[in-house]
Image (cartoon, rainbow, N blue to C red):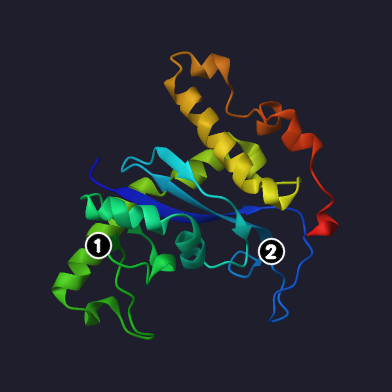
Amino acid sequence: MTHVVLDGTLIESDRLAGIRENGNNLWFRQKHKAFGGNVQFLSAPDGTPLWGSDVEPGSTPDITAARLHALPALYKAASDGLPTLADKGHIGAGTGILIQVRRSKGQSEQALCADIRTFDALVRSIRDLGERTAAELKQRWRTLQHITLSPSRIGDIARAALTLNRIWKRSPTRERQLSPSWSLNEWLPASLVSNSRPIEAF
């Protein structure tokens, strides 16, 4: 494997209670105008899902979630020769995490030198192949499109989807055995469904 791709995604949920110190809702992602949890995914160069993190509230920036759950291991991997590609939401991640250069506000891409433009184009094109992970999982496992259980379970559900996705991909008769349109709830441990807590508690 030449590299891995780090990508954060919002897994949407019902409206949630919880206020940050600045008065904003803890689980509301302004960028998406939606409630949910931030989960970080790692994928192989071809987009194959490899790993999913625990959930952080939707308002958590990608770089913060990555520092909590992914970057320590990725630094070690980078020192061993396995770099990570990430998007601009992870700017400031540090050594071994390759990210496009952020342009100054109002600055056109042509204002950058040729070397930087070439680097950005390479990172973008290679990273795009690996950023299909979240989209693939959400498309195949419709439960990930909107969670109605306790938001603290979002990370568990995402990892369950990763495991089932591997099984589905390895099965030679997957089209017949496991329909992509099935709900993940049908495959989750009963404890994940029965132990859900009221949304108002968060």
| Label 2: few (<14), some (14–19) or many (≥20) C-alpha neighbours in 10 Å | many
State the residue in front, 75 or 83.
75
**Residue visible at 71% across and 76% down?**
24
Q: What x and y, as percent, mark residue 58?
A: 63, 62
Q: Which residue is mark 1?
A: 121
Q: What x and y, as percent, mark residue 115?
A: 14, 71
194 on left or right of 46:
right
Quarter occupied by residue 102: bottom left
Q: Secondary structure at mark 2?
A: loop
Quadrant where the image shows the N terminus: top left
**Residue visible at 57% across and 20% down?**
178
91 on left or right of 162:
left
Q: What x and y, as percent, mark residue 107?
A: 32, 84
Q: What x and y, as percent, mark residue 140?
A: 56, 34
**Residue visible at 53% across and 39% down?**
137
Give the amino acid type for the residue marked by disc 1 in the picture: Ala
Q: Is residue 30 above or below residue 84?
A: below
Q: Which residue is mark 2?
A: 27
